Image (cartoon, rainbow, N blue to C red):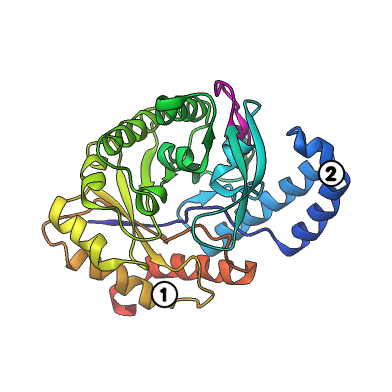
Amino acid sequence: MTELVATTPGLFPLPDWAKEQLSDLKGHQKSDLISGDEGADITAAYEKGRAEVIDRQQQAGLDRVVEGQLRWDDMLAHPLAVHDAVETRGIVRYYDNNNFYREPVITEDLGFSGDVAEELEAAAELTDDLQAVLPGPYSLADLATDEYYGDELIEGIAEFLEGEVEAFPDVETLFLLEPSLVTNAPGEGVDERASEAIDRVAGATDADVVVHTYFGAIPEKPYAHLMDADIDAVGFDFVTDHETNLYNIQEYGTKDAVALGVVDGQNTLVEEPETIRERIDWVQENVPAQSFDTVYATSNTELFYLPVNKSNAKLDALANAVSLTEAEQ
């Protein structure tokens, strides 16, 4: 019997009140923010926002609850952007869209930070169904500029992330977000190193680890290497490219669990629960040789692209899709 789990890749949009309040506060505390320190008022605003987004996920009935990553102004680059060994410089386009992040330039060894662990410790006080979210080592290396590690950049970032994960509180699931495996797929040799780096980070936790990919489909060779990593599930973007993702599963198989990006994280059109469930069933029907222990039903991308009301509506739709009985489909 397949377990259906409703979840998201995190990175929620800031509530409107928080955008206004934080914009004003940050405007008055620029020197603190540049040094990585946040004042008490900013910290309090993020704490309020965290509690709000966790409560909203619980209201929707999601099976896994994320911290929300409201502090991640630099999106997946955040763990580097707040690190003491990293200089943030100019503004860089975030993948192929109209979002931007500060360029993180690694100038020294990436020692332990604990930034994400602190967020998760606070979230763990509010839910027993906690899911951690972290950039995968290949995507983080892709987003960074390196002035320290040289040819060992991926390995250096994997070591850094391994230490961060080891400090996490108990979580049910870890979503490692790896869109760069699609958008800037690793070539010969690098694909194997990327898989080994992912394996190293995944080995730092006892939680179920999902490597979630999106903005399309992973090319065949990097996908085959990814399957060598000791992870619990690969996530597939069935919104952007369902045919190639289905081909990868049919041709190369996948893990006993799978994450299906079946809700569009970049489109304000809210899918009906029945439509979402049909997409989940379609995948399972088209890979009859593969029987999944767990299917994580999720949005294909992070949700920060959406207005808050649309993001919340998609949370409801995901949870309702998973809870549909056969009679209701």
Residue indicated by mark 1: 273
Task: Please state the horizontal and vertical placement of residue 296, each as a whole percent of the image.
Answer: 36, 55
Across and down, in percent, residue 164 comes to: 52, 28
Residue segment shown in magenta:
106-119
Residue 214 vertical position relative to residue 42 in the rendered view, above or below? below
- Going from N to C along the chain, the mark reached first, 1 or 2, is 2
Residue 120 appearing in the image? no
Look at 60% across and 41% down and name the residue there.
Answer: 78
Q: Relative to 176, is 79 on the left or the right?
A: right
The residue type indicated by label 1 comes to Pro
Residue at x 52% of width, y 39% of height:
144
Secondary structure category for the residue under label 2: helix
SS category of the residue bearing label 1: helix
Taking depth in this image into account, of 117 and 176 the one nearest to the observer is: 176
**Amino acid type of the residue tagged 2 in the rendering:** Asp
Tell whether 128 sits left or right of 86. left
